[in-house]
Amino acid sequence: MRDYQEEQPWLPFSEALLEWDDDFHELMLQDRLRMAAYRKAIQETVRPGDVVLDLGTGTGILSLWALQAGASRVYGIDLSAPVLARAVERMAQAGLADRFVPINQLSFDVSLPEQVDVLISEIMGNMADNEDFQPILRDAIPRFLKAGGRVLPQSTATYLVPVAARQAHRSLVEREVSTLSPKYSMERLCREKGIRSPFNIYYDTILPRRTYLSRARCLYRYQGEWEQPPCYSVDVPYPVHKAEWMTGFKAYFVAQLSPSVTLDISGDDIGGGSTSASWKHAYLPIEHPLQVAEGDTVSVRFSRFYPDAGARFRQIYRWQGEVLRAGNVIAQFDQCMDESLTVSPEVVSG
């Protein structure tokens, strides 16, 4: 497994979905937190004889576990033909190829010959919805799942907290950002997203709890048939509990995979295995650190939207707000993946 440390920014894997190579899939397969939670949840959810859909099957590990749990057939949908070929090979090695049906298409374009008992997916980014899973599942659930069928995960919740992550911020100033592949660089990412400032995008970064300036709060929750809107804007106040320099926000998800299995990626114990090696956390920086004091309030408006109605895999996030002291605004910030919308931050008073 690649080494990674606290506050070390990595380019966001969720912004390069169509370019995941063997290195990234191996990183996911070695993620102990992810693997243990999904394996247990699949064993709890899939019953002998079930027909299962693995949406975004990748190299097929979740499909394999579903077949080992007794599924009579698993449909595995993935957009990457080379990666799906690895899934087919995995099933053949396990002697289960006759019960695995690979489908190399985008799920929106797929029609199955039957409805399934269980729909499994692991298309969550470290903010839950930064791999566009909500529109995908909102389309897939009514078309592919039998009435009364089971969905894994059952729900997800996204959390946000302001942080003092000086080392991570310094790395962005110096443009020292890690990547799994030299093909995926900060310069290329910013060019393809039309972003000039490295502070207008998020990064995969372990942010320990000692960096928290307040208590993490839930921003948004998806559950049931994923009918919640994919675009939203949420206002959240954070009472500051210590004097520090605020450098941005940590975001993470907590997913209820099955009745007894909760996947929480907020952990920061790298050596102890409570941290996700593949997801890490999302670091949403602010360009100019703000000095905050105990008793201040950080008020943030967090938004998710699309640049146009037909966009796929191109969600935009914006985190903007202000710092209030004794009811007065003392500083403002505004970062957005669509730079045409941002305004220059302003310190209103000392």
Image (cartoon, rainbow, N blue to C red):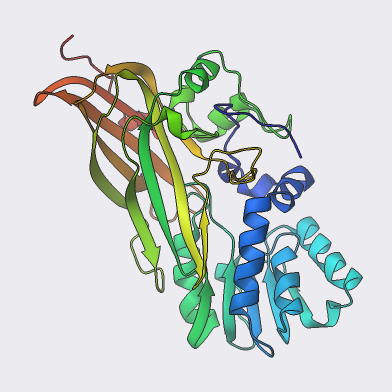
Residue 137 lies left or right of residue 345; in this view the side is right
Q: Residue furthest front?
A: 272
Q: Quadrant of residue 56?
A: bottom right
Q: Nearer the viewer, residue 253 or 230?
A: 253
Q: Is residue 271 visible?
A: yes
- Using the image, determine if residue 189 lies above or below residue 294: below
Q: Quadrant of residue 325?
A: top left
Residue occupying the point 16% across, 15% down: 348
Find residue 244 and report its horizontal and vertical position in percent.
33, 18
Residue 54 lies left or right of residue 241; in this view the side is right
Residue occupying the point 73% across, 53% down: 29
Q: Nearer the viewer, residue 55 or 297?
A: 297
Find residue 253 and report its horizontal and vertical position in percent.
46, 51
Find residue 198 and report its horizontal and vertical position in percent.
49, 23
Find residue 166 and report its horizontal and vertical position in percent.
46, 18
- Using the image, determine if residue 81 lies above or below residue 343: below
- Using the image, determine if residue 173 lies above or below residue 318: above
Q: Nearer the viewer, residue 159 or 17?
A: 159
Residue 89 lies left or right of residue 272; in this view the side is right
Residue 61 lies left or right of residue 129; in this view the side is right
Count of numbered badges drawn on the protein: 0
Q: Nearer the viewer, residue 249 or 115?
A: 249
Q: Is residue 306 visible?
A: no
**Which image quarter holds the C terminus?**
top left
Q: Residue furthest top?
A: 350
**Which image quarter holds the N terminus?**
top right
